[in-house]
Image (cartoon, rainbow, N blue to C red):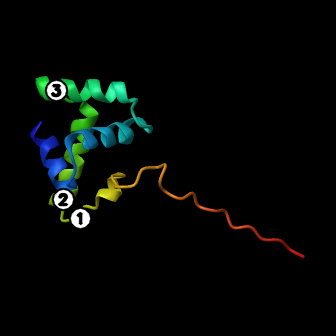
Amino acid sequence: MEHFVKAAEILQTGEYQVLEQAYFNWHGAYAPEEDLNLLFARYMQFGVLPHWAEKFAINVISDFNSQIVVNPGFYSLSSFSPRVACAKKIPTFSIT
């Protein structure tokens, strides 16, 4: 649990967002909101985290302690919602 709080401090975000990113990092997709709320409530009430969340937090701390520049964007934490970001346009060309 200490690792999780420290990781949130390093990433300058909340523990809920760190849990959300840890889920994404482990499962490859974002958690349904109900599942994430249940995991977070369990963490807040009992201090219990899934192993993948603890591992994610330890990796963040390890990167920080190794003096790697810890950028929240590296951990997919940003202030932009996927709905706000612009889709990249695929360049097109023609041979005439």
Using residue 75 as the reference point, say whether residue 12 is left or right of it: left
Kindly identify the amino acid type of the residue bearing the numbered disc 3.
Answer: Val
35, 62: nearer the viewer: 35
Kindly identify the amino acid type of the residue bearing the numbered disc 2.
Answer: Phe
Image location (x, y in percent) of residue 90: 67, 62
Q: How many marks on residues?
A: 3
Of the 4 image quadrants, the one containing the N terminus is top left
CA gap, disc 3 and disc 1: 28 Å
Q: Residue furthest front?
A: 84
* Quarter of the view holding residue 19: top left
Image location (x, y in percent) of residue 87: 57, 57
Q: Nearer the viewer, mark 3 or mark 2?
A: 3
Residue at 18% x, 65% y: name it. Answer: 67
Circle 2 is placed at which residue position? 64
Kindly identify the amino acid type of the residue bearing the numbered disc 1.
Answer: Ile
* Quarter of the view holding residue 69: bottom left
Image location (x, y in percent) of residue 15: 20, 41
Circle 1 is placed at which residue position? 68
Q: Tag 1, which secondary structure? A: loop
Q: Residue furthest right?
A: 96
Residue at 19% x, 45% y: name it. Answer: 58
Circle 3 is placed at which residue position? 48
Mark 3 vs 2: CB contact within 8 A:
no
In the image, residue 94 above or below residue 56: below
Mark 2 vs 1: CB contact within 8 A:
yes
* Quarter of the view holding residue 31: top left
Image location (x, y in percent) of residue 49: 20, 30
Residue at 38% x, 40% y: name it. Answer: 24
